[in-house]
Image: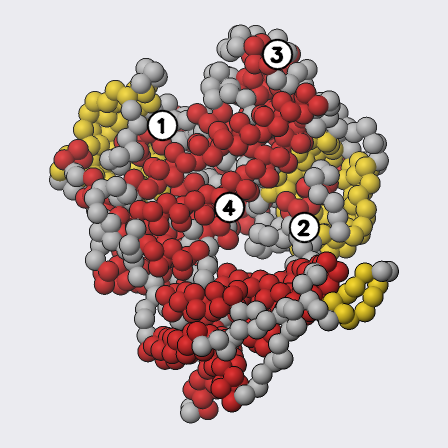
């Protein structure tokens, strides 16, 4: 499946993540944290795909296990004794806090997985390239050079291994050989960069002012995404300011409220975080509709 | 007044070494001019002299005029826009991270307005048919694709003159042909004047309107391709004769036989395409050969020999990561001592992976690689010769490879090797056979790609390996260096060492290998002696076989054809 954020202007996408990620980091309310985690998982699935989400989930599981275990065993802030284990009081609040922290951390990992899939270096640069064209070009070149240098280093390593591996015994010789490899890499990279500079100059680089090509266009779709997202974000902020996202863990954990206003706060937050899924659904629905009209 | 005119151009580098002497060259608007000559004949210098901003530093005299005005009157921006240049190395020429930014780079630099830019980029991408590459990252592209993108990026700037310096020397033949197809199309359909220098000319010789033969900094002859070919074979220049495409070489041989004299043929023009040479050959064959042709077995005797196994690859599979499909899949292959094995196959079939596995640089995912003699020395030539050099001069690199020392000792003793007798006999011999004279004291990056390749091969030979693995050894080599290389490989083979190379160069494999193996779909599909391997193929075969195959089905190389012709002609 195609990343649904590909259909939007990078600015829209970046704004959305600027709304969502900070909220996910600060909201420790169990319901908010759970909502954020679930939505992040869904968003990561529809944008980054199964493979990357799976890898992120693995990371989440390991981190969660550590955090939950650590909090359950060592967190002494609570007041409710859950059970005793080899003379140590294990507190329910500590466990609960660990669980929510794990959810928050997991959701942040997943949101970032989603972010890297939706805003790649090209899009990021595109956003700032209009303001700083030369800096943007420099960063773009750095990205491509980094890849090239990695591949060169690997090739040099191969070749030098083939040539000198049998003679390079002993620490001193191995260090000398490593030094040779680095010098070979520098030589090669510098030599190539001269040709890169030639290629740039031959295409008119540094002959005066530059313009910037536009690859993305702000469309109606972006407005339909940005306005409701912003409204929901503002509403969430209002709820948060009014204390609907507060939750005390110590000494006794609060009970989770479901009053109408509280539920509305949950709903607004849920809606905001479901936007990646909505975008994905919107794409497949418009596609189906466009097919069925034929 | 010609569109481009170079008059009495002399150029010497800052250190005094002359690069061009008294060069005169003109090109009309829309002309396709091919400049050919052996490595180091001054082609690159000539082309760079024509591009303001890239002109090498040194002493210049003479004049270059472009579109009616002296070149030095052009402002930097005007010159950047109207004269495009493409260099050898696709990797170092790409500037940006993504293909579309690369396409926009030149247009942005000359301050093209946004609307014009969108129009130019979209029209060029569509014309080139590279829509599939448009959204990719440049790092994901192959060398051939990168060259295409750079060509497109330059064409989008609407130049009226295009200079290309051996643009295909680092591409495999399939990618090179694709590149030239598009280049010739831009020349024919857009009327852009093209000046291209090459030493591997088989693919484009037929497209040129004019061929300029260059040797030692001079243009020795310039005329139509047919006349240039005829001039080169009539004994005027051996080094240029060796450059000729196979069809011309074969035709020249036939005509020579026809006049039954040892004199070179006195024709003014020679065919240079397979089609024309085939017509000529078949005509001659009907006239001069008997009805029953002697089609003796052209295979040497060596292929029947019993050989000792050097490396056995048993049921080898390899995948780059868990998620990729296997590049090599249950592959079985024996590498023998006393045999030159050529592994051929298309792009991305895993030829390089196969070599790296054999060299022990990576481990197979499944299967076993058995080295029969554990003490055997394995040497590996990677695809890019650049990664072989870790010392400052070619000589020092050779010395270090000779192996007595690594580090400071080699550096100090390396200083007095230059030009004079090397203190190591093996190093001297390898340098001599690979014609590295005069290169020993140079930095590896100051010599041409072909020379670099030769130096890298010499470094491997010094190590006296028992098993020699080479990735595209003939890439970037001119005819002379190829002949030198093949002589060395034969030497190795005769000393009962194992030689394996992977290549795209069918002619090279056909002429010099004892055994050819076709790698396809992760397996060795077919392995045979070159004559069995290439005869009967229509597409995947040598030019000589395409021309003469209908008469001599067993002939694969130019030499085979000549030999058979001689035999049959005597009979009739």
Q: Residue at x 28, y 62 (%)?
A: B118
Viewer-nearest residue: B71 or B389: B389
- In the depicted structure, whether residue A35 falls above or below residue B446: below
Residue furthest right in the image: A86
Which residue is under mark 2?
A: B518
Quarter that holds the C terminus of chain B? top right
- In the depicted structure, whether residue A283 falls above or below residue B457: below
Q: Residue at x 81, y 46 (%)?
A: B368
Write down the chain letter for disc 3: B
Q: Are marks 4 and 1 in contact (CB under 8 Å)?
A: no
Q: Is residue B85 left or right of residue A98?
A: left
Which residue is under mark 3?
A: B409
Write down the chain letter for disc 1: B
Q: Nearer the viewer, mark 2 or mark 4?
A: 4
Which residue is under mark 4?
A: A147
- Callout 2: SS: strand
Q: Are marks 3 and 1 in contact (CB under 8 Å)?
A: no
Between discs 2 and 1, the one toward the N terminus: 1
Q: Residue at x 34, y 16 (%)?
A: B15
User: Which colour style is shown?
Assistant: secondary structure
- Callout 4: SS: helix
What's the distance in space between the residues labelled 2 and 4, CA to CA?
32 Å
Say few, some or many: other residues with alpha carbon within 10 Å of mark 2 (under 14 / 14 to 19 / 20 or more): some
Labels 3 and 2 in the same subunit = yes
């Amino acid at each position: 499946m195609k990343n649904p954020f590909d259909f939007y202007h990078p600015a829209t996408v970046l704004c959305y993540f600027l709304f969502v990620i900070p909220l996910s980091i600060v909201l420790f309310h169990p319901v908010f944290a759970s909502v954020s985690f679930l939505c992040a998982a869904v968003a990561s699935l529809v944008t980054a795909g199964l493979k990357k989400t799976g890898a992120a989930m693995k990371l989440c599981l390991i981190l969660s296990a550590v955090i939950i275990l650590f909090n359950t065993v060592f967190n002494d802030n609570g007041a409710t004794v859950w059970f005793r284990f080899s003379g140590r009081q294990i507190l329910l609040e500590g466990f609960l806090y660990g669980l929510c922290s794990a959810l928050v951390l997991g959701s942040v990992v997943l949101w970032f997985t989603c972010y890297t899939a939706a805003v790649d270096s090209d899009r990021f640069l595109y956003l700032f390239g209009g303001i700083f064209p030369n800096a943007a070009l420099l960063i773009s070149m750095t990205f491509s050079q980094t890849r090239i240098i990695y591949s060169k280093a690997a090739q040099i390593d191969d070749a030098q291994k083939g040539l000198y591996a049998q003679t390079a015994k002993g620490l001193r010789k191995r260090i000398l050989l490593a030094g040779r490899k680095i010098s070979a890499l520098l030589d090669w990279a510098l030599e190539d960069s001269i040709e890169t500079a030639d290629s740039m100059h031959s295409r008119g680089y540094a002959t005066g002012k530059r313009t910037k090509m536009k690859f993305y266009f702000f469309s109606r779709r972006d407005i339909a995404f940005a306005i409701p997202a912003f409204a929901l974000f503002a509403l969430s902020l209002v709820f948060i300011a009014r204390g609907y996202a507060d939750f005390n863990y110590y000494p006794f954990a609060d009970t989770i409220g479901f009053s109408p206003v509280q539920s509305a706060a949950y709903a607004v937050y849920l809606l905001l975080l479901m936007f990646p899924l909505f975008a994905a659904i919107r794409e497949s629905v418009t596609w189906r509709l466009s097919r069925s009209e034929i | 007044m010609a569109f481009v005119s170079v008059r009495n151009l002399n150029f010497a580098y800052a250190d005094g070494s002359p690069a061009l002497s008294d060069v005169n060259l003109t090109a009309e608007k829309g002309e396709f001019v091919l400049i050919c000559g052996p490595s180091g004949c001054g082609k690159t210098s000539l082309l760079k002299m024509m591009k303001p901003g890239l002109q090498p530093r040194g002493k210049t005299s003479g004049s270059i005029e472009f579109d009616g005005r002296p070149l030095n009157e052009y402002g930097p921006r005007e010159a950047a826009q109207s004269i495009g240049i493409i260099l050898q190395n696709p990797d170092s020429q790409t500037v940006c991270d993504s293909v579309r930014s690369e396409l926009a780079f030149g247009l942005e630099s000359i301050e093209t307005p946004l609307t014009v830019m969108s129009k130019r980029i979209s029209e060029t991408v569509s014309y080139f048919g590279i829509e599939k590459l448009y959204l990719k990252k440049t790092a994901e592209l192959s060398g051939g694709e990168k060259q295409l993108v750079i060509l497109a990026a330059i064409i989008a700037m609407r130049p009226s003159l295009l200079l290309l310096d051996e643009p295909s020397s680092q591409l495999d033949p399939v990618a090179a042909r694709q590149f030239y197809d598009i280049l010739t199309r831009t020349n024919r359909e857009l009327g852009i004047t093209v000046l291209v220098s090459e030493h591997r000319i088989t693919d484009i010789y037929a497209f040129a309107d004019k061929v300029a033969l260059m040797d030692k900094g001079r243009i020795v002859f310039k005329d139509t391709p047919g006349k240039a070919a005829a001039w080169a074979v009539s004994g005027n220049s051996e080094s240029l004769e060796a450059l000729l495409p196979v069809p011309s070489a074969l035709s020249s041989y036939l005509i020579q036989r026809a006049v039954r004299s040892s004199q070179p043929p006195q024709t003014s023009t020679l065919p240079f395409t397979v089609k024309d040479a085939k017509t000529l050959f078949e005509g001659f064959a009907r006239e001069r050969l008997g009805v029953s042709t002697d089609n003796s077995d052209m295979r040497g005797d060596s292929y029947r020999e019993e050989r000792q196994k050097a490396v056995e690859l048993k049921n080898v599979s390899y995948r780059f990561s868990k998620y990729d499909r296997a590049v090599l899949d249950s592959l079985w292959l024996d590498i023998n001592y006393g045999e030159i094995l050529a592994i051929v196959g298309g792009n991305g079939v895993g030829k390089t992976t196969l070599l790296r596995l054999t060299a022990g640089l990576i481990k197979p995912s499944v299967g076993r690689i058995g080295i029969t003699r554990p003490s055997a020395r394995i040497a590996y030539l990677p695809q890019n010769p650049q990664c072989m050099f870790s010392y400052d001069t070619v000589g020092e690199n050779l010395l270090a490879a000779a192996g007595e020392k690594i580090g400071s000792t080699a550096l100090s003793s390396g200083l007095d090797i230059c030009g004079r007798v090397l203190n190591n006999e093996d190093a001297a011999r390898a340098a001599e056979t690979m014609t590295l004279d005069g290169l020993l004291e140079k930095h590896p990056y100051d010599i041409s790609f072909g020379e670099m390749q030769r130096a890298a091969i010499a470094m491997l030979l010094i190590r006296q390996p028992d098993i020699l693995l080479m990735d595209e050894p003939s890439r970037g080599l001119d005819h002379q260096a190829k002949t030198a290389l093949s002589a060395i490989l034969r030497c190795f083979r005769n000393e009962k060492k194992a030689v394996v190379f992977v290549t795209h160069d069918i002619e090279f494999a056909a002429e010099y290998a004892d055994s050819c193996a076709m790698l396809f779909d992760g397996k060795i599909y077919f392995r045979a002696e070159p004559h069995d391997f290439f005869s009967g193929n229509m597409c995947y075969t040598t030019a000589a076989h395409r021309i003469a195959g209908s008469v001599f089905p067993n002939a694969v190389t130019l030499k085979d054809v000549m030999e058979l012709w001689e035999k049959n002609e005597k009979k009739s």
